[in-house]
Image (cartoon, coloured by chain):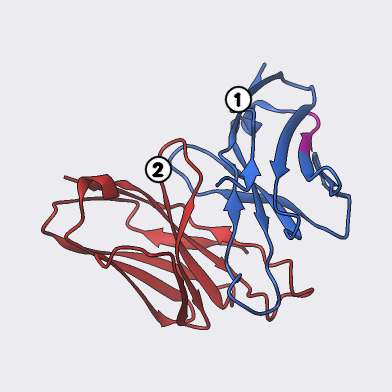
Chain colours: A red, B blue
């Protein structure tokens, strides 16, 4: 089973709203990721969590706030977003290179995404 | 700076024929390569991968070839089926066992494959 789930599937919010995106995996993976994808573009890495600790922040604006409450869950808290933040937000997980069989073959599995529209 | 390039934005193939999707990279330190398939409004689905110690990996109808000297990889789909119609992303990584490279997948811009009956 390589399933990553994300809720909600769609989200429409105003620029003053606060909302959260949720991601869950039960594969025992210890690395989790948030990506942003615009139409006809590849996914762009936003954050990486390794063993529930933030290990990479790709200079993402503070209106995006990630949280990893436990090894299975990853949240992305949204506040005061701009219309240009409208995109598909993808969560991914991977076993973790420290625990992967060979140390380099650490495959990321993606969830279905949350389609976010900021009005 | 695009370190992974998919120079063909689209490919159209007849059902039953071979689809060949190409990918080039510039960073010789990459040691793991993946192909993802993506339908509209869905997340990318992992298809197949190859590490730099191999030059070929097969999984059913999908075969990935790696030419390290040319910094080129390709995905072959045989036979192509209409359900294969999707955007295919090539991704590369130089994941090390430890260090700040954790999690960094470098994606190409994707190739839209259309398989027609």
Indicate the secondary structure of the residue bearing disc 2: loop
Would you say residue B47 sits in the magenta stretch?
Answer: no
Along the line of sight, the residue nearer the viewer: B27 or B44: B27
Helix, strand or loop: magenta stretch: strand
Q: Which residue is mark 2?
A: A38
Question: Disc 1 and disc 2: Cα gap in Å?
Answer: 18 Å
Kindly identify which chain the residue marked by label 1 belongs to: B
Q: Position of residue A77 (x, y in %)?
A: 27, 68
Left or right: B56 as drawn, with respect to A102: right
Stretch in magenta = B75-79
Q: Quadrant of the N terminus of chain A?
A: bottom right
Asked if the residue at tag 2 contacts the one at tag 1, i.e. Cβ–Cβ closer than 8 Å, the answer is: no
Q: Position of residue A61 (x, y in %)?
A: 29, 63
Q: Residue at x 71, y 41 (%)?
A: B24
Q: Which residue is mark 1?
A: B10
User: Is B13 situated above or below B7?
Assistant: above
Along the line of sight, the residue nearer the viewer: B44 or A9: B44
């Amino acid at each position: 089973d390589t399933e990553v789930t994300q809720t909600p599937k769609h989200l429409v919010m105003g620029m003053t709203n606060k909302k959260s995106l949720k991601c869950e995996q039960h594969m025992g993976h210890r690395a989790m990721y948030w990506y942003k994808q615009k139409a006809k573009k590849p996914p762009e890495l936003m954050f990486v969590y390794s063993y529930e600790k933030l290990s990479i922040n790709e200079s993402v604006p503070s209106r995006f706030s990630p949280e990893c409450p436990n090894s299975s869950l990853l949240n992305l808290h949204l506040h005061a977003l701009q219309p240009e933040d409208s995109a598909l937000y993808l969560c991914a997980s991977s076993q973790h290179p420290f625990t992967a069989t060979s140390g380099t073959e650490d495959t990321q599995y993606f969830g279905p995404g949350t389609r976010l529209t900021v009005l | 700076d695009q370190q992974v390039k998919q120079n063909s934005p689209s490919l159209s193939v007849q059902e039953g024929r071979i689809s060949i999707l190409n990918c080039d990279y510039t960073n010789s330190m990459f040691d793991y390569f993946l192909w993802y398939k993506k339908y509209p409004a869905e997340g990318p689905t992992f298809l197949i991968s190859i590490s730099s110690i191999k030059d070929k990996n097969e999984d059913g109808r999908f075969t990935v070839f790696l030419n390290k000297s040319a910094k080129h990889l390709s995905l072959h789909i045989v036979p192509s089926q209409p359900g294969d119609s999707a955007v295919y992303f090539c991704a590369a990584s130089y994941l090390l066992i430890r260090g700040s490279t954790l999690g960094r997948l470098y994606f190409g811009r994707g190739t839209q494959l259309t398989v027609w009956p």
